[in-house]
Amino acid sequence: MTSSAQDQTIAFNGLRFHYRDWGNESAPALVLLHGLSGHSRTWDSFARELREHYHVLALDQRGHGQSEWTSDYSRPRMVEDLEAFARALGLRRFALVGLSMGGRVAYVYAAQRPETVERLVIVDIGPETAAAGAQRIRTGLQSKDVFDTPEEAFRQSRAANPRPPEAELRHRVFHNLMQREETWRYDKAFRSPDRPLQSPEDPSMAWGLLAKITCPTLLVRGAESDVLSREAAERMTREMPDCRLVEVLNSGHSVPTDNPAGFLEAVRPFLTAASAGRGSG
């Protein structure tokens, strides 16, 4: 997968962060946040399709990708990172897409800073995580994490998830490896069995936050998701003032990777309708 994105490094909140900048600076800004154990390169296919409409910026969140590791991975710190990122790049108002962990960061930020978010896309996450999905994620985090070759890492990821197109999964896996050590890039702290998947404030506080999200919102659910139940998704659409639910077929929790074409078809019209005629972010 070739790209024309530029890899950039920026420092704030005492850490060094990496992000992918897809150019088109005169267009409205679109910030992309990956999920737990993910990285900014997982958005490459999607970003390539949106760069004509947006100035796309994909951030490696703390402890992930090429961003610096730390001892604090609480959601308030990650929300502060997003706020500092927007401030550092001069983003006064922007569209925001977040998957899983990044989706939670995105909707908390949108609730706390509604004046800055033009449109919001929440991908397969809500205030509550279904038990089956939480167990699967926990098991995956505890699986082998040092490999003899990149191909071995790919085979393990393929065994865990048969849905993604091969090129998409290889791209995600290979860019998530520290090549000299053949181990995952994200902080080993996330793989600790003692670390909770959710911050202590969830879910009760998060349900209340949803009502404060005033921008148009698209909630994307994988039709076969074991993380976001249909019941929870429908409740989310009722809690948010301006929210629409769409389900992507042939997809589990990792919607953009499981079915890239289906995800693009679901999300692009929502985002491009807002970008037409807008100025710089």
Image (cartoon, grey):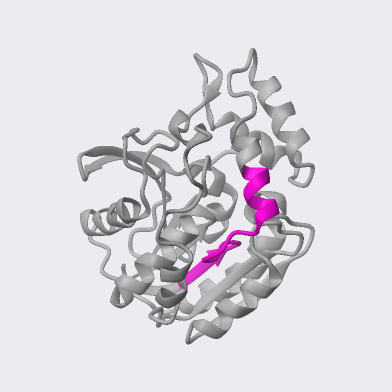
* The one of 268 and 139 positioned closer to us in this rendering: 139
Q: The N terminus appears in which quarter of the rendering?
A: top right
239 displayed left or right of 18: right
Q: Is residue 102 magenta?
A: no
Report the residue at 52% width, 49% height from top. 35
x%, y% of residue 78? 34, 52
Image position of 276 with respect to 127: above or below: below
User: In the rendered image, which quarter is residue 255 located in?
Assistant: bottom right
x%, y% of residue 154? 69, 28
Q: The C terminus appears in which quarter of the rendering?
A: bottom left
| Range drawn in magenta | 120-137
User: In the rendered image, which quarter is residue 168 located in?
Assistant: top right
x%, y% of residue 41? 51, 42
User: In the rendered image, which quarter is residue 54 located in?
Assistant: bottom left
Report the residue at 62% width, 72% height from top. 232
- Asked whether the viewer can see residue 51, the reply is no
Image position of 247 with respect to 1: above or below: below
- Asked whether the viewer can see residue 74, the reply is yes
Report the residue at 59% width, 59% height from top. 129
x%, y% of residue 188? 46, 29
